[in-house]
Every structure is written in C-alpha cells, then in structure tokens.
Amino acid sequence: MVSVAILGAAGGIGQPLSLLMKLNAHVTKLNLYDIVNVTGVAADISHVATNSEVKSFLGADKLAQAVTDVDLVIIPAGVPRKPGMTRDDLFKINAGIVKGLVEAVADNSPRAFICIISNPVNSTVPIAAEVLKGRGIYDPKRLFGVTTLDVVRASRFVRDIRPKIDAATLRIPVIGGHSGNTIVPLLSMASTPLDLSETEIAELTNRIQFGGDEVVKAKDGAGSATLSMAYAGARFADSLIRAIKGEKTVEPTFINLAADEAGAEAYRKLGVGSLEFFAVPVELGSQGVARIMPLNGNVTDGEREAVAVAVNALDANISTGLNFVRHSAK
Ligand SMILES: NC(=O)c1ccc[n+]([C@@H]2O[C@H](COP(=O)([O-])OP(=O)(O)OC[C@H]3O[C@@H](n4cnc5c(N)ncnc54)[C@H](O)[C@@H]3O)[C@@H](O)[C@H]2O)c1
Ligand SMILES: O=C(O)C[C@H](O)C(=O)O
C-alpha cells in the first residue's frame, strides 16, 4: 500500500509520469494535483486497468487535501526552459512554486518522502530542505533531487558509441548536481568496463552534461525533456517504493550529505569538502537513504578535476536556494 501524490500532474512531465505511476503495482492511491487541466488528466488515467485509485485535485484550495496521508510526493511543477535559457533562469518562478508545495506537504504529510524534479534542482532541493527545517521536521534521508535522467542519458549515450552494450542494464554513477558542468559522470566506474579513449571520455562527458540542451533545442521553444524525464522519474520512484517495501535498491540522487556522514566521507575527500548537498549513489531502504555507496574504484584525474568545477558552481546554487527561504521567512 503506497500512496503517491504528483504535484504538477497536468504538465509535460506530469502526465506521462502519472501514467507510469498508475502502472506501478505497488501504488494503491494516486493523487494528481495541478493548478490547471488536471481533472481531465486524472479521469483519463483512472480508466487504465490497474488497481490504484486515481483522484484529481485542481487549484490551490485543493493542495492540502492532495498531500494529506501520502507516503511519497513527486514534484515536477514549474516552468521549463526555452532555448537560450539556463536552468538557473527558472529560479525566479520555480523557487516560489516549490516552496509553497513543500510547505503544504510538511503541514499535511510530514513523514512523506519528497522527490523534486522542478529545476533548478541544485537550488530547489535546498529550498525544500530549508522549508522542512523551518517546520522542525527535516529528515535528510527523506528528501531527494531527481537526477536519474543524467544516469539514464549516460547509459544511452554510451550505447550510441558501443552498440554491443545493453543500455537498460549498464549503470554509470553520475555525481554532483543537475546542470551543465555540475553533472559529473564517473565513466571509469561503469558497471561494465568501457575501455574508452580520452577523446571518447571528453565527448561523452560533455554530452551527458549538456544532454538537456539537445532536447530544449530540438523542441524549439516548446519546452524541455518530458518523456525521458517521466521515464527517469518513474524509475527513481519505483526504486524508492521497492526500498520502502523492503528491497535494497541503488540510485544516484541529489541529497543532503548529512543523510550519511560516514558514507559521505569518501566524496568529501574527493574534493566535495564541506558542501551540504551533492548527488551521490545512494542505497535506498525503508527509511529513505540507507547509506551513501562507496566509490567503486579510483577516480581518474579528469573526474577529480570535474568534481572541483562542479563544487564551485554548486556552492553558489545551494546558497541561492537556502537564502531564498531564509530571506522570505523574514
Ligand atoms: N530534474 C530533471 O532532470 C528535469 C528534467 C526535465 C524537466 N525538469 C523540470 O521539470 C519542471 C516541469 O517541466 P515540464 O516540462 O513538465 O513543464 P510544463 O510547463 O509542461 O508543466 C509544468 C506543470 O506545472 C504546473 N504548475 C505550475 N505552477 C504550479 C503550482 N504552483 N502547483 C502545481 N502545479 C503547478 C503547470 O500548470 C504545469 O501543468 C521544469 O522546471 C523543468 O525544468 C527537470
Ligand atoms: O534541460 C532542462 O532544462 C530540463 C532537464 O533538466 C534536463 O536535463 O533535460
């Protein structure tokens, strides 16, 4: 029995993500919330022949109900990029949206696991943390920035140059954050040794870091990744749900490293230093973060340099998020 709320369910990500969560056999209740169009989306999805109950919640006055008695909240609400924009350009609008939604979750389902998709993830996750801290209910083990799309892209892009690789099972840890050079794929630690040349590593790393731009450019003003993101979001949610149910699953995700300081140590030594939030491979368990997975081997000099670049940018992104809540609280 797992109750899930999706906030922003009528959007480009929200609709296919809602459908995929309707197909998840562990989900018993699916609350779909948006400020527009969600009534039709929920009616449509509710006809899919699985056992979960779908309910729609339209408009701000239904938000509290939508997030009452839920185990897991997934947040893809907010504006997407257009060509020429960075994810940080979305902060102005999405920061307030995420803050308001997490406040409602905190007040109505304080123990819910929260998965943030809304960009810029590097700042919206710190916003969520600060809101939860303000309510005195922050548990770093239960808040996740969804960076699974970077992991999905890494596997798929490797297959583009190594056609014998199975993209569905190849796992490449992607650490850091979720924008440009804060995304650090550890190609040297792929689940299958890849034997890549220096040029291939440089090209793949760049493609994984800027994969989002490929979609923004191709959509030409109509938004950013939605379908691959729904797939990635559903994959992360499924891993978390299976973990809640007692299985051990592993996913890289952007978390507060305080969730497992002992496990974070290896990453701190790698150059992450005292940074509060960072994407790391996490073993998920019934209480959320069970442990941060160790580095599986020695990182290369190039990967270490990429971490240093990511840490600088992340430091600023994290402060922007934390300060947004601290200043708006005054
Ligand atoms: N984490 C990732 O890897 C990743 C990947 C792709 C997109 N994104 C981000 O996800 C977000 C959504 O993208 P999209 O393509 O689905 O956008 P979209 O515009 O298609 O959908 C967003 C939805 O959010 C809703 N919304 C806006 N304000 C709301 C509020 N206060 N409460 C509830 N719902 C609200 C809108 O009505 C809309 O239905 C963007 O910020 C985008 O950058 C993140
Ligand atoms: O690129 C974007 O703005 C959306 C998302 O973060 C992505 O990586 O596709």
Image (spheres, rainbow, N blue to C red):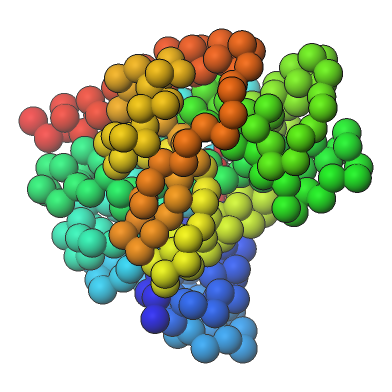
Q: Quadrant of the N terminus?
A: bottom left
Please say whether residue 326 is visible from this viewpoint.
Answer: yes
The answer to whether residue 62 is above or below residue 310 is below
Q: In terms of image quadrants, where is residue 256?
A: top left
State the image coordinates of residue 64 (x, y, percent, origin top left).
Answer: 24, 66
- In front: 108, or 83? 108
- In front: 59, or 289? 289
| 121 horizontally vs 107: left or right | right
Counting labels gives: 0
For image coordinates 61% across by 63% down, the residue present is: 16
State the image coordinates of residue 15 (x, y, percent, origin top left).
Answer: 57, 63
State the image coordinates of residue 4 (x, y, percent, origin top left).
Answer: 40, 70
Return the residue found at the far front: 297
Return the residue found at the far right: 163
The answer to whether residue 274 is above or below residue 122 is above
Q: In terms of image quarters, where does ligand 2 lie? A: top right
For image coordinates 40% across by 18% down, the residue present is: 269
Q: In terms of image quadrants, where is residue 216?
A: top right
- In front: 113, or 131? 113
The answer to whether residue 178 is above or below residue 290 is above
For image coordinates 45% across by 45% down, the residue present is: 282
- In front: 71, or 99? 71
| 137 horizontally vs 248: left or right | left
For image coordinates 26% across by 73% down, the residue present is: 69
Q: In terms of image quadrants, where is residue 32?
A: bottom left
State the image coordinates of residue 124 (x, y, percent, origin top left).
Answer: 36, 37
| 156 horizontally vs 81: left or right | right
Q: Quadrant of the C terminus?
A: top left
Please say whether residue 78 is visible from this viewpoint.
Answer: no
